[in-house]
């Protein structure tokens, strides 16, 4: 199933509640929440209180992408705040398996993300323990960047491996996803698409989400 996860990084933060209600009404499947610590990535964004506030305004799953060092120190707070999916970076810490176990022990779905320069082989050992894999198609830190084409080969390789193992892992892609390139990303095998500037930079959220879904479905693997 194709899912669209608008990234609130490109929303109007002064009207965040309204923006999230608007994407829910417009057909979004997840709310993608980009958490940045100014250390793992060169930007600072939001923490657990904002996630708790969002939990009050939407029933959509909160897909929380932790672009932070030492994620284990913060996972319990984000879980308590109402995150549904918690994704950590393969590159962020020495104890990836411990992070995944911690997320699952809190009753949440666990994801692992890889940066553009990280090979898919970095996920070989952990793949069976995941609910979601997130392939970064930009270097994390900022919205509005261009899609890095080498992500396509990584998505295809992960799709093959997920299918070969018979797993139900969602394969999410994040960065530079637009209505005019989503078809080839879907053809490579992604099924969850983060789109920040494409959705929030458009005048009509419903039309943009519909176009993203239509174009993805036209080519989905
Ligand atoms: O995690 C990130 C950036 O680090 C993303 O979620 C971006 O926010 C996506 O924005 P667009 O590339 O779709 O504008």
Image: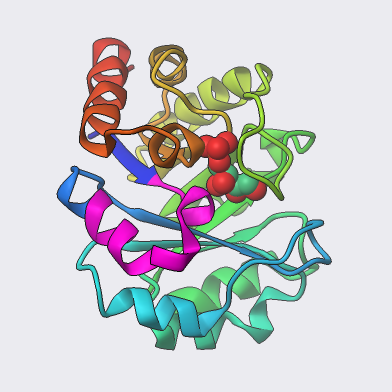
Above or below, 159 relative to 129:
above
Task: Determine whether, in the image, residue 38 is placed left or right of residue 201.
Answer: right
- Asked whether residue 82 appears in the rendered view, the answer is no
Above or below, 108 relative to 88:
below
Task: Determine whether, in the image, residue 73 is placed left or right of residue 178.
Answer: right
Q: Residue at x 37, y 81 (%)?
A: 53
Above or below, 144 relative to 151:
below
Q: What colour scheme has been applied to the protein in the rendered image?
A: rainbow
Residue 124, given in percent of the width and then of the height, sits at 63, 43
Which quadrant of the figure has residue 182?
top left
Residue 4, given in percent of the width and then of the height, sits at 32, 39
Give the magenta-colored segment's residue range: 6-23
Q: Residue at x 29, y 39 (%)?
A: 3
Task: Determine whether, in the image, residue 22 is placed left or right of residue 170.
Answer: left
The quadrant of the picture occupied by the C terminus is: top left
| Nearer to us in this view, 31 or 19 | 19
């Amino acid at each position: 199933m194709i899912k669209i996860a608008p990234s609130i990084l490109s929303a109007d933060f002064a009207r965040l509640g309204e923006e999230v209600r608007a994407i829910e009404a417009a057909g979004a499947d997840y709310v993608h929440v980009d958490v940045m610590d100014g250390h793992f990535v060169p930007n600072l964004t939001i923490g657990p209180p904002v996630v708790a506030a969002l939990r009050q305004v939407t029933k959509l799953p909160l897909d929380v992408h932790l672009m932070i060092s030492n994620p284990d120190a913060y996972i319990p707070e984000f879980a308590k705040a109402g995150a549904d999916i918690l994704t950590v970076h393969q590159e962020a810490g020495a104890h990836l398996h411990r992070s995944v176990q911690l997320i699952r022990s809190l009753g949440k779905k666990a994801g692992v993300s890889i940066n553009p320069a990280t090979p898919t082989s970095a996920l070989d050992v952990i793949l069976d323990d995941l609910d979601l894999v997130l392939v970064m198609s930009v270097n994390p830190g900022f919205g509005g960047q261009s899609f890095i084409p080498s992500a396509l080969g990584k998505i295809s390789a992960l799709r093959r491996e997920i299918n070969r193992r018979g797993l139900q892992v969602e394969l999410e892609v994040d960065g530079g996803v637009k209505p005019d390139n989503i078809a080839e990303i879907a053809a490579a095998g992604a099924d969850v698409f983060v789109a920040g500037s494409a959705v929030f930079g458009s005048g009509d959220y419903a039309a943009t989400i519909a176009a993203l879904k239509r174009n993805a479905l036209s080519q989905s693997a």
